[in-house]
């Protein structure tokens, strides 16, 4: 009898140990690592891919990414094709049956795909799908992660995804989600108030990655330094831009950290507009390792640039 009891105890120990094994999650960008850690708590271990300082459209695939994806239970990503430079290729070589690229759309396909864009109110959905317009994002502008108001949706999608992959802990993910939202939602309300001086401010950005930031802050983005998405500015375009900025009284130039500082500085000199540097991913700027810190830093930098 004693022996049976011991065997049962051992079995229980090994079961609880198996239960304690964390889910292995990979997230494409740093703020998704942050939010997944908050929602997953100690039930998950989260690895990131992009560092946050690079251009998300040009993240270079590394062999270490393949190893991470091969062993992962799920991949958390922004979606709307923004990770198409690296994610489909990685999913293809990682050969993880839980997450593979759809041969037609190259989107992630399988139970381990956690798409944070589900339910996002997309802006700038293209009327025509012509490459002549630059980078192609058929479902609309994919840079919703810098619209601070999209944080709760991202967190909810992650909670839902983790619950799908690990239904036994669905209640834990819901509990963690609630704790995160209780912290995040009051901050978003506070940021909305803080953003008041930005309302109606005319601005240009380097890349067309700011519509959600514009929707949240009220900044009116009238043009980009890039000729079109993914296409560097030409001298003609820059001359036209100076003219347009003067005519429309543009007072703010938003430089995403990954773009060169020279052209925005030159534009500022020509037009008198002020430059604000923002991050389009967490970790793009020092001290922005979380979604909250990124949103806060971006807002502060914008406010500083428009301060009288
Ligand atoms: Zn883009």
Image (cartoon, helix red, strand yellow):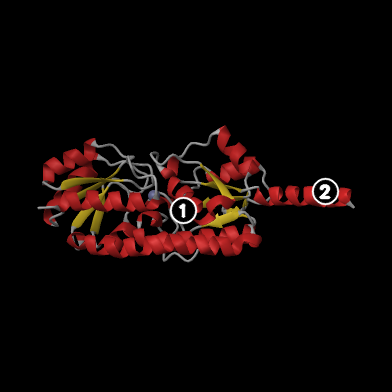
**Viewer-proximal residue, 236 or 155?**
155
Residue position for label 2: 6
| Residue 300 numbered tag | none
**Viewer-proximal residue, 61 or 288?**
288
**Viewer-proximal residue, 8 or 38?**
8
User: Within 10 Å of the Cα at label 2, are there few (<14), some (14-19), or many (20+) other Cα atoms?
Assistant: few
Residue at x 44% of width, y 59% of height = 180
Quadrant of residue 189 within the rendered picture = bottom left
Residue at x 13% of width, y 52% of height = 307
Q: Is residue 275 visible?
A: yes
> Residue most toward the front?
2
Q: Is residue 209 visible?
A: no
User: Horizontally, is 132 left or right of 189 in the view?
Assistant: right
Ligand 1 within 8 A of label 1's CB?
no
N-terminal of the two: label 2 or label 1?
2
User: Horizontally, is 53 left or right of 72 in the view?
Assistant: left
Quadrant of residue 52 within the rendered picture = top left
Residue position for label 1: 35
Residue at x 56% of width, y 56% of height = 114
């Amino acid at each position: 009898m004693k022996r049976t009891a011991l065997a049962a105890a051992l079995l229980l120990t090994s079961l609880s140990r198996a239960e304690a094994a964390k889910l292995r999650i990979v997230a494409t960008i740093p703020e998704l690592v942050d939010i997944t850690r908050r929602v997953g708590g100690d039930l998950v271990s989260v690895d990131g891919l992009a560092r946050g300082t690079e251009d998300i459209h040009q993240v270079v695939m590394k062999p270490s990414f393949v190893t991470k994806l091969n062993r992962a239970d799920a991949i958390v990503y922004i979606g709307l094709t923004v990770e198409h430079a690296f994610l489909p290729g990685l999913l293809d070589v990682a050969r993880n049956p839980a997450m593979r690229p759809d041969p037609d759309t190259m989107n992630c396909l399988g139970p381990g795909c956690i798409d944070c864009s589900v339910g996002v109110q997309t802006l700038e959905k293209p009327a025509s799908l012509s490459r002549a317009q630059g980078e192609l994002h058929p479902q609309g502008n994919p840079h919703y992660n810098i619209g601070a108001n999209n944080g709760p949706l991202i967190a909810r999608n992650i909670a839902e995804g983790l619950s799908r992959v690990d239904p036994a802990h669905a209640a834990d993910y819901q509990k963690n989600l609630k704790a995160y939202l209780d912290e995040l939602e009051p901050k978003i309300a506070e940021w909305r108030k803080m953003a008041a001086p930005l309302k109606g401010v005319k601005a240009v950005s380097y890349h067309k990655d700011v519509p959600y930031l514009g929707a949240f802050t009220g900044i009116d983005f009238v043009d980009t330094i890039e000729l079109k998405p993914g296409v560097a500015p030409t001298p003609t375009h820059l001359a036209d831009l100076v003219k347009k900025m003067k005519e429309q009284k543009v007072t703010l130039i938003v430089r995403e950290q990954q773009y060169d500082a020279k052209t925005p500085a030159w534009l500022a000199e020509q037009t008198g507009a002020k430059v604000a540097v923002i991050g389009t991913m967490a970790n793009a700027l020092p001290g922005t390792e979380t979604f909250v810190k990124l949103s806060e830093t971006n807002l502060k930098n914008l406010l500083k640039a428009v301060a009288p």
